[in-house]
Amino acid sequence: MSGHVAPARAPLPPVFVEALGSHFGDRLQTGEAVRLQHGSSEAHFEPMLPDLVVFARSTEEVQTVVRLCTEAGVPIVPFGAGTSIEGNALPVRGGVSLDLSQMDQVLEVRADDFDCTVQAGVRREQLNADLRATGLFFPIDPGANATIGGMASTRASGTNAVRYGTMKDAVLSLTIVTPDGKVVRTARRARKSAAGYDLTRLYVGSEGTLGIITEVTLRLHPVPEVISSAVCGFETLEGAVQTVVQAIQLGVPLARVEILDDMQMRAVNRWSKLDYPEVTTLFFEFHGSEGSVAEQVETVKMLSAHNGGGDFSWSNLPEERAKLWKARHEAYYAAVNLRTGAIGWATDVCVPISKLPECIAETKRDLAGSSIPATILGHVGDGNFHVVFSIDPNAPEEMQEVEALNARLVERALALDGTCTGEHGIGLGKQHWLLAELGEDAVDLMRTIKRALDPKDLFNPGKIFAL
Amino acid sequence: MSGHVAPARAPLPPVFVEALGSHFGDRLQTGEAVRLQHGSSEAHFEPMLPDLVVFARSTEEVQTVVRLCTEAGVPIVPFGAGTSIEGNALPVRGGVSLDLSQMDQVLEVRADDFDCTVQAGVRREQLNADLRATGLFFPIDPGANATIGGMASTRASGTNAVRYGTMKDAVLSLTIVTPDGKVVRTARRARKSAAGYDLTRLYVGSEGTLGIITEVTLRLHPVPEVISSAVCGFETLEGAVQTVVQAIQLGVPLARVEILDDMQMRAVNRWSKLDYPEVTTLFFEFHGSEGSVAEQVETVKMLSAHNGGGDFSWSNLPEERAKLWKARHEAYYAAVNLRTGAIGWATDVCVPISKLPECIAETKRDLAGSSIPATILGHVGDGNFHVVFSIDPNAPEEMQEVEALNARLVERALALDGTCTGEHGIGLGKQHWLLAELGEDAVDLMRTIKRALDPKDLFNPGKIFAL
């Protein structure tokens, strides 16, 4: 976390800082530590500091910040939990880091409608804790305990997406502050609507470049009557993926199905003190009634055996399930810590599911030629997987090597009609690949929208694409 | 269909018509009959004729039309099957009606990836016929045999949406011709992506106002092992809706659940020669394995009995199911034909599901005070319902009365935090209500996007909002 980038910039206009200060008092902070925290990410990017940090507590306060910033021409970058991994919240042109973590109120839960409205700074674990008494839950689980606003901004998804979708499916409506300082609610609470342009989906995944998300209305789901989990190691990658494809063909409503390669299993065993066989492994979760879950388990067990799966170890016990998913949630840290003192670089791609074995197999061959430890884990039902590199921070040549490995990975995914990012977003890290994926004309369309809505380029400038 | 609107307009520039003609030969048509067909809708709107109709067969041909139109400043309105009901495809400023019905090729079915790519003019029944051998199906069913491009443009949904989502969920990627004549593919084929702005969802529901959709890549689903259907009449509306809410709470994955009021049941009995009890009725469909469907049926049967349901008549027989859904599909015509020679006006709203009994009950009270026959039917799992009016074409005062009834319906839905249209789109008919629903600032955001992408206002002008 040393040697952060601090390009020469004109200081913020004193009258602007004064006006902000008069509104926010000690919730405007300029100390080095807080700026460094807001200018750093969990990933491999060098820190880039904002000029100041403001902690907002309401949509109205966000509106105040937006109006002052646009008036003064100061960049404004929303900040949630800081868990994004493509540098999505780094203030590359300084300005204001607008911290929304104090907007942490669950505003309303409407159990009868299977929905709720939260402030953008609510974290997903907090929300699920709050929901416990209702019999409902919020299924999107990207691993990190991210904020709901951040998850909406990056179109996050994670382990449950195969059954419950991504943030694009989970968000019913957003409250946003537009670049011209208006408060807009993008939709009503109806489960579906054909009323005009889908502003909700335009803002989901826009990474703060079109305005600030301040409140989110979310679809919720009933907690299943029975939840079972299972683990199964496979002789081959193809066998593991075929098991999932066939399960989907048979209509098995898999709730979670994660693939971990041999390296990732070794990392998980070490980090979480487990003793799974260190082979390509699927982690499953099944949701449903007792009868339905029993049938799902039976079907998948049969398919696994048919496709070279080993011992199919399943359980209805919450503690067994918790152990399994704790290991999965810690997989990133387990992977990074394959080397002591290493730093992590996580990347993700997503391909049509029939291309997944080819994409993973080629990637493994490529990784095998490198000296840098790297693991593969993914959401196999969606064709989405991650590579996590464990990089020696004192060996700058390793960063270059990972860059090359990542580039080949993304090119491989694109050649298979996949995407350069299934769930991390473009941020700073994948702008070149967005162009390769969709072409100049598509990105120009995005730029046209950006310029129309944010003509001064003040909202998280420098992200997704160069203007 | 008489007395169509023909406002005084300057004729199209001869050089433009000549250029179009040299490209399209006899696929450029100017006859009164074909123009009337493309200037009419199934709904209550007066015909508005285009200057000419062009039948395109490829994305390149659409690009040619777009370039000639933008050069000459001629409006361009895409036309699919003409089944939309808010006047969505009426050429209010004349110009070119761009008929895409000859773009009817299913370009590729990738069964291993559960997806396919079709030209925009493919109709949903044709697609499902083509898919039969694959074991997959395309679930979105708005009733009418609409084109896939039209369904994408209006964000259609229908009877299966409670389980399989709407067009926003079904579309993986679009090929569009932008107003500046570029061909853009909005996404790759990955099941999910976090790569930049969600252009796919921006175009789904944009009603041709931002460019022309020429190809659509769709998610497909495995045909369920077992499909059961059921019918059950209820003592009360509340009992019917409570049955559905409780089923969802219990995690029953309802594939279809339609509500038909007593008037609609009377219409269905007459039209389809059936003898169901003429009370509030639910039509169900259950998809899954044999065990799962049996369990679903058992659960819903129990809930129905508990909530004042009568005879719960269910069947696994395809012919029984076909009879039931044929009646449902004909419900619109059945409703219109409650009076001989009547014309139909169908409207739709969608509210949070807990508000559905209140919204329907109040609507029924309002309809009871009118002399115009009207039925209610809806997709109860989504909180979405339709009112179909049977209007005497020779009694102009009836049109006014329906306008007032429709206005009160929409206001009622908005007061309950619902939307003015769940699946028909805004078109011409609901522009005022879009403003009421989302507010001037939200609609201004849409206008800003429209102006940025279509600065000359040539693409389906006059729809969704006034510029």
Image: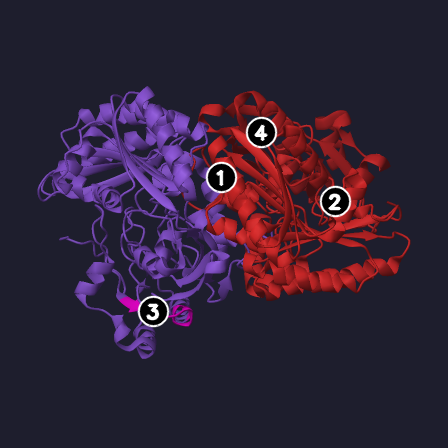
Chain colours: A red, B purple
Q: Secondary structure at mark 3?
A: loop
Image height of B313 relative to A389, above or below: above
Span shown in magenta: B53-63
Q: Secondary structure at mark 2?
A: helix
Determine which of the numbered discs, if any, sits on residue A270 in the image.
none
Cα gap from disc 3 to disc 1, whole angstroms: 50 Å
Image height of A109 relative to B438, above or below: above
Q: Which residue is mark 3?
A: B56
Same chain? Circles 4 and 3 = no
Cα gap from disc 2 to disc 1, whole angstroms: 32 Å
Cα gap from disc 4 to disc 2, whole angstroms: 28 Å
Q: Amino acid at mark 1?
A: Glu
Taking the spot 37% from the left edge, 57% from the top edge, the residue there is B149
Instruction: Tell whether position B55 is magenta.
Output: yes
Dividing the picture into quadrants, the one containing residue A156 is: top right
Point out the tag, 4 or 1, that comes first from the N-terminus.
4
Q: Which residue is mark 1?
A: A295
Cα gap from disc 4 to disc 1, whole angstroms: 36 Å
